[in-house]
Image: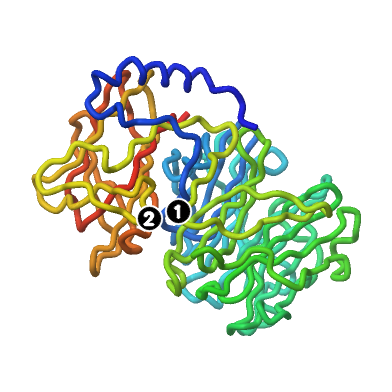
Amino acid sequence: MRKQKSKWTVGLLLMLLLSWGLAGNAGAASIQQDFYNVVIQDGADPWAYKHTDGYYYFTKTTGNNVTIWKSRTLSGLDAGESVSVETGGKNIWAPEIHYLNGAWYIYYAKDDGDNANHRMYVLENKSQNPLQGTWQDRGQVKDNTNKWAIDGTVLQVGNQLYFIWSGWEGDENVSQKLYIARMSNPWTIVSDRVEISTPEYAWETNHNPHVNEGPQVVIRGNVINLIYSASGSWTNDYCLGLITADINADLLQSSSWHKRSEPIFKSANGIYGPGHASFTTSPDGTEDWIVYHNAKNNQSGWNREIRMQPFTWNADNTPNLGSPLAPNSKIPVPSGEPERIRIEGEEGQFGGVAYASGSPNGSGGMKAGHIDTADSFVEYSIDIASAGEYILSARTANGTTDLAWSTLMISVNGAEPAPFYITNKGWENWGLSTKRVHLQAGVNIVRFTKGNGYGEIDLIDVFPAN
């Protein structure tokens, strides 16, 4: 059940009701408490952690550095404050940020340009805010075999830390297995590695090399749930599997871990290759959410985006993830997030050759587009009760030929236009473009003009950043 509307929501609604007659097309705005996937239009290996300060700290694979985002909301992750941390390596994969023993740690895989040299490393920051302070290189996190290793994560049971990762048994890329080892501190392994999962079922061995990777841990009751990714990450068959252990068992015994014979989350409803998930809760802590990546299109391989949805629990304390929700289905926002002002794209004021047209997958059956010339535009009037920082979140599409990214140019209240990026995954295959903007109290004019390539807008949501 939803809680009472916040003071912000009530004030905003009153402001809208009082000012609709004065704000151009603002009368077309509505107050909404839902969103559409996607939440981040480009990226893979998402990690979302909610800290005790009420903020979400988010990372994903970004290339040759680690970028940390800080956000009050799950649905606003993409527009959160961010900072990049240099590592001195190449091919940085699947970073995670953890808070352990009073300090922040970033675990990440890197190499020197040769995949065979991928190993796990860790950085430490003792600042209360990980976007500030100094990151100290704590070096490689390794066991005594020092074999190929990626996708490391930390499991804490009581005061004991364990490191879990995906690695090779030998020195060749034949099969990725999951290993666990005991740690004496957040950067030191002090036991032999123990294999707890190897690809064995048909859905894990249907592509070469065979893959178990992306381990993530969620504890519920006395059950340790280790959710992992299986099959080829470059294929539609990529999916999530489950291994469990009792929290009181000897976790360094392979026999303590029990694998399910079927995947628990796989391609469905027009979503392909869902995998490498992380797990968190809603802002008020009442809901559980999975954040995962998937292929942008059928058979698009490593060209991926990030989605999220709520999940429930089975009676045995294992996660019931269900199936990926269909791309054009509305999802209630995470409980505790503010409601948002929504304006349908077709409700804008058009100029030049721009106009609204039909949209089979659009939220209102229409969309704004054809912003094809320098003098073309679509603009929206948005009434805000209080001045401040807001997230402008637009459901967008781009099918421009031979162009990976398009831009529309966005201007708020006549300011210098700035790029508004739209990934290319085809017309009517809606993604999400976001911008953190400062809005004044009262009516704000947001105008979109032509940039590089072409883009369309299904709807715009506006909600507080803080």
Residue 87 seen in render: no
Q: Picture quarter containing residue 394?
A: top left
On screen, residue 234 versus residue 27, left or right, reads right
For disc 1, the marked residue is 328
Q: Nearer the viewer, residue 104 or 325?
A: 325
The image shows residue 37 at horizontal and vertical percentages of 47, 51
User: Would you name the residue on which mark 2 appears?
Assistant: 361
Per the model, the C-alpha gap separating discs 1 and 2 is 6 Å
> Closer to the camera, 402 or 357?
357
Q: Name the element at disc 2.
A: loop
| Residue 16 image offset from top left, x and y in percent | 36, 21
The quadrant in which the N terminus is found is: top right
What sort of colour scheme is used for the picture?
rainbow
Q: Are marks 1 and 2 in contact (CB under 8 Å)?
A: yes
Residue visible at 73% across and 80% down? 200
Query: For residue 122, what is the image quadrant?
Result: bottom right
Q: Residue at x 49, y 46 (%)?
A: 330
Determine the residue positioned at 49% across, 53% down: 66
Report the number of discs. 2
In this rendering, position of residue 355 left or right of residue 78: left
Residue 85: image x %, image y %? 47, 49
Which mark is first along the chain, 2 or 1?
1
* Amino acid bearing label 1: Asn
Vertical comparison of 205 with 146: above or below: below
229 or 181, which is in the foreground?
229
Residue at 27 percent across and 22 percent down: it is: 443
Tell me, yes or no, if residue 163 can be seen here: yes
Query: Label 1's element?
Result: loop
Residue type at the position of mark 2: Asn
